[in-house]
Amino acid sequence: MRKVLILIFIVIITIASTYALIYYVGMQGFAFAWALNFLLMGCVLFFTETLKAPLTSPYYNERPWEQGGKIYQSLGINIFRKLLVWIGWEKLNKKSSPVEKNTKALMHLHYRTKQSELGHIIILMIVLVINIFVAFKFGFLKSLWLLVLNILFNLYPILLQRYNRPRIERVINMSKHR
């Protein structure tokens, strides 16, 4: 019961914070798109960390259409990975949660890819709804920053998790056979 109340509280805080952002910044432009994405990232992080769902859905399994990651490579996932290294995200991420070379740590990393993907999917959908609203109310050009940052901050991280997870699974399987 306590967990459910915390989750409800997080949703209420998210809605109130988003409303405050809209009220004080407005719904147009780069500042709103940037702040909205980071606000939602923080709130969704608290939500998924509190939820701690097992995330065993078949959705997280690799699909045949993903062609072993070739589809993601054609969409520029390697450029996105280099961008993450260039801006220092990869270094920061490894510093805050280094990957150990044992099966338990790899299993935890595998779970974290699912958790991260879930969080980015939630944010992607929320920002997409707001993006569509802004496009209809103020015009497509006024909603362009929402679209661009939603792709960079949410869609590509989802693709990256889907690209990395099968590789992590292979390493886990190899470490179990040793």
Image: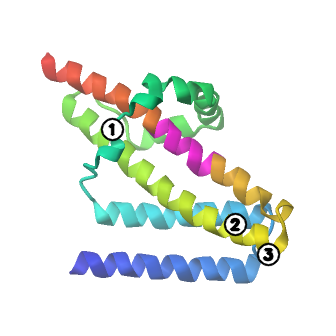
Quote the CA–CA distance across marks 1 and 3.
38 Å
Residue tagged 2: 132
Q: Is residue 80 above or below residue 25?
A: above
Q: Which residues are magenta?
A: 152-161
Can residue 12 be seen here? The reply is yes
Q: Which residue is mark 3?
A: 137
Q: Dot 1, crowdedness within 10 Å: few (<14), some or many (≥20)?
A: few
What amino acid is labelled 1 in the image? Asn
Q: Quadrant of residue 49?
A: bottom left
Q: Earlier in the sequence, mark 1 or mark 3?
A: 1
**In-image side of 89 versus 68 (left or right):** right
Under mark 3, the amino acid is Lys
Q: Nearer the viewer, residue 86 or 82?
A: 82
> Which label's residue is closer to the chain start, 2 or 3?
2
Q: Is residue 83 magenta?
A: no
Question: In x, y percent, where is residue 53?
Answer: 27, 58
Kind of residue at disc 2: Ile
Contact (Cβ within 8 Å) of mark 1 with mark 3 = no
Q: Position of residue 155 (x, y in %)?
A: 58, 47
